[in-house]
Every structure is written in C-alpha cells, then in structure tokens.
Amino acid sequence: MSTTLLHMHTEPQVPLEAETLSPASIAGLSELGIEHLQVMHGNVKAKVGDFFKVTGRGTPDIHIEGDLSRVKMIGAGMAEGRVIIEGNVGMHVGIGMSGGEILVKGDATDWVGPEMSGGRITVFGDAGHMVGGAFRGQSTGITGGEIFIHGNVKNEVGNSMRRGFIAIGGDAGDFTAVSMRAGTIVVMGNTGVRTGAGMVRGTVACFGESQILPSFEYSCRYQPLFLRLYLIRLQEHGFGEKITDKHINGKYDRYSGDAVELNRGEILLFSGQ
Amino acid sequence: MKVMRIKKTEITDTFAEAFGMWGARVVITADTKQWARAAAASMTGFATSVIRCKLEAAVECEVPPEATPDRRPGVSVLLFTMSSKAIAGQLIDRIGQCVMTCPTTAAYNGLESEKTVSVGGKLRFFGDGYQISKLIDGRRMWRIPVMEGEFIVEESFGIQPAVGGGNLIILGTSQRIALRAATAASNAMREVAGVFLPFPQGVVGSGSKVGSRYKSMIASTNDRYCPTLRSISGQETLPENVAAGYEIVVDGLNEEVVKQAMRRGIHAAASRGTLIITAGNYGGELGKYKFHLHDILK
C-alpha cells in the first residue's frame, strides 16, 4: 500500500489543532494540497506545510514522524485507513473516529479516543488521563471501538464509556471506569482508588491489585469464559508477554456493583489461581 | 448404456438427485473434548432426514483448541433445513436444549455469510434479565448466567443455501460385504470439509422412495432395492447376485463438496468388493441438483 509521509520540520510552540491530519481529509490531495490544509496553531490559522514536509499523494495510509506531543486531534473523525505516528502524540488523538486504525509508537497525552465509536487506537507507550472518557459535561464516553495502551495510564480511563473495549498493559490511575455505562476494560497491572465508582453496567478485569469500594459485593470465584475471548484477542494484538495461560485459564473473583447505581457492573480480580 | 468399472465394481450410468436446503455451522466448545462431543451428539440427535425430523444434522469434524474461538476443544456441527425460516428455530431449540444444558459448553457461529439468523439474541431471554452482551472483534456474544457459571452463545449465526440429498447406493453379494463397503465409503466421505452424512455412521439400511400406496406416508421403503422383494414387486432393478444394499446420503454446503465426497465414497466402496454402485433419483423432476456418477469420476 502506498503511504503519505509527513515529517515534522518545525515543532509548534503552542498546541497545534490538526484535525486535518486524517485519511479522509487528505484523500486524493497532492503533496502541495496537503501542505495547504489548515491547522490552528494556538488561536492562529496556519498550514500543515508550516510544520510538516509532505511526501506522497493523499492515501489512506499516513505515517507521521516527529515529536507530536503538542499536536492534537490527529485522525479526527476517521472512518477507514491507517495513521501511524512514529513518536509521541498530543491530546484527543482519534477524536470521533468510527473506523480504521491509529498506531502511536510512543506516548499519548490525555483523552485518547474521545467520542470514538469504532476502529482501533493502539498506543505502545503510556497515555494520560481520560483514555476513552467523556468530555467534561458530556454523559457518555466512547460508544464503540478498541483502545489498546501497552503502558500505564492516568486517571478516569473509560469515564462514562457506553460500549467498546479498552486494554491497559500496565497500571491504571484512580477512578478507572468511573460512571461506566457498559463495555469492557482490562487492566493488566494495578488500578488506583475507587475503581468502578458509579458504574451502571460493564466489566473491569484486573490482573493486579484493586481496592474494591464498599458499594461492590463479592459474588463468586470462577473462570469467566467470555474474558478468555478478550484475552485471546489481546494476545493476538501484542500483549502476549503480559497475558499468559494462567490469566486465560485462571479464576477471577467477581464483585458486582456499583450499588449506588444499577448494580449490574462487575469487577473481576485475577485470583492468581 | 456406457459401462464404467472401478476394479470389479460396476458404476451405473445414472445420477443422484439432490435438493436445495439451507445450512448453518455451529462450533461447540467445552472444557474437555468429551463434553463437546456429548453436546454435539445431543444436538444432532433425531436429525437424519427432513422427511420426519424436519432437520438434517451431524458432526462435521472435531476442531482442535488452537482453531476454536476460546481455544478449548471443539466440535463442528452442520445443520440443514428445507427453508431459511426453519433453520433459526432449529438452532434456537437445539442450542438451547442440547448445548446450553451440557456442562462447560459454549456455542459459536462457524459460517461466515451475509445472511444471518438471530440465535443468541433469542436464547438470551433464558437469562431472565440478568444476561449480558459483549461485542468482541465485531461478534456479539451473550453471557447467560447459569448454575455452573455462564453460558456463552453468539448472537447471530450465518446461514447459506446448501445441497441436501446427494447419495450413493452400494450393492453387494452379501450383507456383510455391502456393509463393509458402505462403511468404508462413509468414512472416506466424512473427511471432506463442508459435508456431513446425517444417518447413523453415515449408512442407511432402509433407503426410501418418495410416496407410498398409503396416503398418510410421504415416503416408503425403496422396494426396487429390497432383495426380499425381488420376485414380488415387479421391479427388475436388482441383479440376481445382489444380496443386500445400503444407501449413503450426503449433504454439503455446496455442490463441489458433495461431488468430492461422492467421488471419494465411490472409490472407497469399490476397493471393498462392491458389486454395483448406483444412485437414487426421481427421474430428475424433483431435485435441483443432479450428480452424474460417471461425470464426478472424470
């Protein structure tokens, strides 16, 4: 597959809102056409070419190189194609995406995949707060798709998520799955305090330690067959070293909650057996 | 009439007449191979012929753990009905009553098809409101809480047009020789992916013809091939030195796999001392498919 390469030659001094760096926006454009696409450098209108050297015509496959820590909204609204980011990336990567794939070969900052409804985002490093979470003032987080973070994440992963699948290869911060409506979160490390606070439905599975709120009640220790399906899928997506046969075949302690809500959510803690 | 022989076996210049059906494939998994087999055996019970069972079904093959969705031992089951409408009901009934009730099992769709029917989407109501759905890699699964933990069933199962009623009739100089040849043919035919032989061990001891002298019967004994009726029925189909015959019915997901199975079956039976291999048809007036024995051996 041919590729469109964007190489950063000038780092932005303030956050760069680059929602045009998405397969749909650059589709069919020439190198010059892509370089003339608008971005917002702070509150100033700028062009893609002010920051990136473009090689190749607009294709569904985009490679972006450089330190993109201040570049926001890459892959916004994408429905197909693939964006590969060879480095760190800024906030709101994959905002509103409904299909396709984003690969981040570094770290991501806050709000990975807000308003996402489909597709997959993979971050090979760490991520910030609010992975897959709802924007402040909104009632729902992601409504579909998959977010795979190989490293650690900060607070409120999956805040108010309604559907979808989030996997964290390391630790998750406080308030994991807070106000979760449905969906599945797998944390292969530990979670911070108040996991599942206010969750209505949905699943949090945790291999490490997690404090259980008093509004959750112990159900049983069992082998959740459905979790095997998720873990097998994660093994096939690069988590093979963190997910072993003992996790796939092992038993989990099931806690139901949150009793302050519908009480239909669940936290599954790996028992070690 | 052209005479074709394989070794000393005569292959009659005729054709098997087969019908259009609708097929589905269910992959049953369980903690052990034994439980998966038990569920498959229960699910495919009373499913030899649509004539009275309203369904034809059998085990297609065993599936190794590395090839099943949950990496547990599995069994693949094929189920065919005469209409697309009927198949959904059969899947719901048989997965609900025969698989869900069998310890440690789960049921997954094994057929990618544009046309699907809701199965788990209906069985979920057994969960009485406590069921949970999960969307995993684009496939919706239902978790139904049960006494041993949870039963997992996929929401939708693919269905596709299929072929039912491919057949061989194997005639021998003794019942023992004919059965040995039919068994060999059955074993060879069942190795073809996408086909199944709905009768016990794939061999039919009482093949039938369409209709009867009795109004209430839609099928009756195939008197042309009954050795005891040689001098009574007025039919001269059966050569004098034929002492017994068996039919093998083969259903498949498409024409090609049925042909392939029949070809293997003919060769396997011919190597076991069969006198004649022929096939059942209705003059070509009823079935959509015709499998000419000489053609499929070319």
Image (tube, coloured by chain):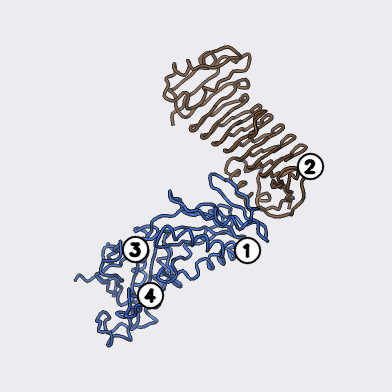
Chain colours: A brown, B blue
Q: Given the image, on which type of amino acid does mark 1 rest?
A: Pro
Say which residue label 4 marks: B181
Which one is earlier in the sequence, the residue at label 3 or at label 4? Answer: 3
Q: Which residue is farthest top?
A: A44
Q: What kind of residue is marked 3?
A: Phe
The secondary structure type at the circle numbered 4 is: helix
Which residue is tagged 3? B19
The mark that comes first in sequence, 4 or 1, is 1
Q: Which residue is mark 2?
A: A211
Same chain for mark 4 and mark 2? The answer is: no
Where is residue A39, by image quadrant? top right
Residue A109 appears in the figure: yes
- Label 3 with label 1: CB-CB less than 8 Å: no
> Where residue A22 sits: x, y (%)?
51, 26
Q: Tag 1 or tag 3, which sits nearer the N-term? A: 3
Answer few, some or many: residues within 10 Å of disc 2's Cα (few below 14, many 20 plus, some between 14 and 19): few
- Residue A213, position as x, y percentages in the image: 79, 42
Q: Is residue A202 left or right of residue B271?
A: right
